[in-house]
Image (cartoon, rainbow, N blue to C red):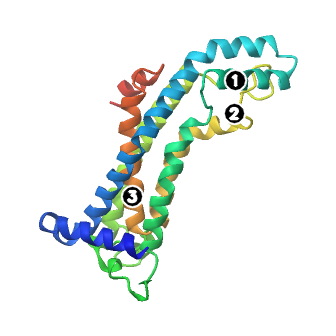
């Protein structure tokens, strides 16, 4: 972790002439962008996989109809089709999983008062008036919602709410264009439990508001930057998926 702390400090030193007291916050945003660039090939592969699934949908529908009286055989046939076409039903999870280490590094770095037996000087760095090691509860106790620290969080909440609303509209429109069969019917989804997940999926973006409120501000910056990046990236990568163009028009 001390190596990672040194990396953040050196990056902040480079950005200091431009961002001064908020140089460390800018370094975190830049670090997040670098992580997202590294993960971008996985995001592109995920988009190709999900587009391939969309192309397979007519064949999957045929298999469900053919084996509707034998759910186990239906599941095997669908999974075999995915293997033949080299399409993973869970490919969309990979970009998120590969970002978790970077998030937890930032979380722990700005949650510890000491690093390598020495005082963690990064905790004193700020974004505006809010310390990067602080949380929203700390801001509420120092000036309230509209205090100097509270306003920093209000800006972050506003960004997250805007991105979440964009994602919500886009996901709802795409799901309407590509409905998932209900559990318990002859058209049961190929992945167990996927029906419940898809019902909750449009609201998942709003959970980011809770994350931003409870983690250190440095980790919150990572989350806000990453989710904003994801929204733009997915809008570009999935622009030719059914339902996406309509969602973009609605959001705009």
Within the image, what quadrant is residue 78 found in? top right
Q: Earlier in the sequence, mark 1 or mark 3?
A: 1
Q: Residue at x 58, y 23 (%)?
A: 53
Are dots 2 and 1 in contact, CB under 8 Å?
yes
Horizontal and vertical percent for residue 4?
38, 69
Secondary structure of the residue carrying numbered label 2: helix
Classify mark 1: residues with Cα within 10 Å, few (<14), some (14-19) or many (20+): some
- Disc 1 versus disc 3: distance between alpha carbons? 35 Å
Image height check: is 87 above or below 39?
Answer: above
The label on residue 92 is none
Residue bearing the label numbered 1:
181
Regarding residue 220, the answer to whether it shows in the image is yes
- Disc 2 versus disc 1: distance between alpha carbons? 7 Å
Horizontal and vertical percent for residue 92?
54, 37
Horizontal and vertical percent for residue 251?
37, 31
Q: Is residue 189 left or right of residue 154?
A: right
Image height check: is 157 above or below 125?
Answer: above
Q: Quadrant of the N terminus?
A: bottom left
Q: Nearer the viewer, residue 82 or 71?
A: 82
- Disc 2 versus disc 3: distance between alpha carbons? 30 Å
Image height check: is 161 above or below 197?
Answer: below
Within the image, what quadrant is residue 199 found in? top right
Q: Earlier in the sequence, mark 2 or mark 1?
A: 1
Residue bearing the label numbered 3:
222
Secondary structure of the residue carrying numbered label 1: loop
The label on residue 195 is 2
Q: Nearer the viewer, residue 104 or 177?
A: 104
């Amino acid at each position: 972790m001390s190596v990672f702390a040194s990396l953040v400090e050196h990056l902040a030193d480079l950005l200091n002439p431009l961002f001064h007291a908020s140089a460390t916050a800018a370094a975190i945003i830049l670090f997040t962008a670098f992580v997202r660039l590294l993960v971008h090939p996985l995001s592109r592969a995920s988009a190709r996989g999900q587009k391939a699934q969309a192309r397979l949908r007519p064949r999957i529908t045929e298999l469900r109809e053919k084996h509707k009286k034998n759910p186990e055989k239906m599941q095997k046939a669908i999974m075999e089709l995915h293997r033949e076409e080299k399409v993973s039903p869970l490919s969309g999870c990979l970009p998120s999983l590969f970002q978790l280490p970077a998030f937890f590094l930032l979380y722990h770095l700005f949650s510890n008062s000491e690093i390598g037996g020495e005082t963690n000087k990064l905790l004193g760095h700020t974004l505006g008036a809010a310390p990067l090691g602080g949380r929203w509860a700390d801001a509420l106790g120092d000036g309230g919602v509209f205090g100097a620290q509270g306003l920093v969080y209000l800006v972050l909440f506003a960004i997250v709410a805007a991105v979440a609303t964009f994602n919500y509209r886009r996901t709802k429109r795409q799901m309407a264009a590509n409905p998932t069969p209900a559990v318990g019917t002859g058209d049961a989804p190929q992945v167990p439990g996927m029906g419940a997940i898809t019902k909750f999926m449009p609201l998942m973006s709003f959970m980011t508001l809770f994350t931003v409120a409870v983690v250190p501000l440095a980790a919150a910056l990572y989350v806000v930057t990453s989710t904003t990046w994801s929204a733009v990236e997915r809008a570009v990568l999935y622009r030719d998926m059914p339902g996406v163009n309509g969602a973009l028009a609605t959001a705009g």
